[in-house]
Image (cartoon, helix red, strand yellow):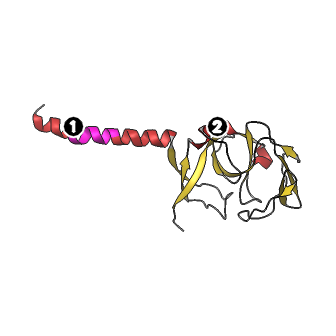
Amino acid sequence: MDNRWKLIVRGYIIPIILVFSLSFLVQKVAYAQVVVQQHSMQNTYHPGDRLIENKWVYHWSDPAYGDVVIIDPTFDGKRFIKRVVGAAGDTLDLRDGHLIVNGNVIDEPYAEGETWPREVEFPCVVPKGHVFVLGDNREISEDSRRFGPVPVAKLEGKVEWKVWPLW
C-alpha cells in the first residue's frame, strides 16, 4: 500500500469507524432517540414525536414522581412510555376518576380523561424495587392499572426532552 492510501486510511477511514462505534455505544448505554408509537401519553407526547432517553439515570438515582419513563420491552412484550405516579411503599387508590397517593388526591394537569381502575385491585401498595406508572391519556392507556407495578430494573430510561417536532 502506498503512502497516499495509508494517509486516507489513517486520516478518514479510522476516524469514521471510531465515530460510528462511539455513537453506537452511546446509544446503547447512555442516550438514545425514541419515537413515540402510542397515544397513551397524549397531551404530553404524540405518535411520531422524537424524544431523547437517558438510559443511565436510574443507575445512580431512583425514579421520581412525574418522571416520564421508557419501560423495557422485555417487561410486557412491548416498549411503553409512561409517567411515574407511585414509588415503593406508596398506597395508591383510584376514586371518582382521581388518583390518590397516600391519602392525597393528586393534581395532574397533564392527564387527559379520568383515572378508573382496571385489572389491578385498589387500593394498591407499591412493592419495594417497583414503581407504579400511568399514561397521561388515562382512558386509553395500557399501564400499571392493567399489568401492576413495574420493577425499577425494567425501566429502560427517563425521557429528558423532545427533539421533534419542536412545538
Classify residue 82 as left or right of residue 167.
right
Q: Residue at x 79, y 38 (%)?
A: 127
Q: Along the line of sight, which residue is nearer the eye, 116 or 95?
A: 95
Q: In the displayed structure, does residue 81 sit left or right of residue 145?
A: left
Q: Residues within 10 Å of mark 1 (few under 14, many from 20)?
A: few
Residue under the point 60% across and 37% down: 59
| Label 2 element class | loop
In the displayed structure, would residue 141 be above or below residue 2?
below
User: Could you tell whether 18 is left or right of 91 in the image?
Assistant: left
- The residue tagged 2 is 74
Query: In the figure, 1 relative to 99: above or below?
Result: above
Quarter of the image where the N terminus is located: top left
Which quadrant of the view contains residue 21?
top left
Give the residues in magenta: 11-18
Relative image position of residue 86 (x, y in whole percent) = 76, 48
Mark 2 neighbour density, 10 Å: few (under 14) some (14–19) many (20 or more): few
In the drawing, what numbered circle is on residue 48?
A: none
The image shows residue 37 at horizontal and vertical percentages of 60, 54
Q: Nearer the viewer, mark 1 or mark 2?
A: 1
Q: What's the residue type where badge 1 is placed?
A: Arg
- Kindly indicate whether the residue at mark 2 contacts the one at mark 1 (C-beta within 8 angstroms): no
Per the image, the residue denoted by label 1 is 10
The amino acid at mark 2 is Thr
- The question of residue 12 being in magenta is answered with yes
Question: Which residue is outermost to the top?
Answer: 1
Relative placement, left or right, of 17 versus 125 is left
Looking at the image, is 36 positioned above or below residue 78?
below
Q: Earlier in the sequence, mark 1 or mark 2?
A: 1
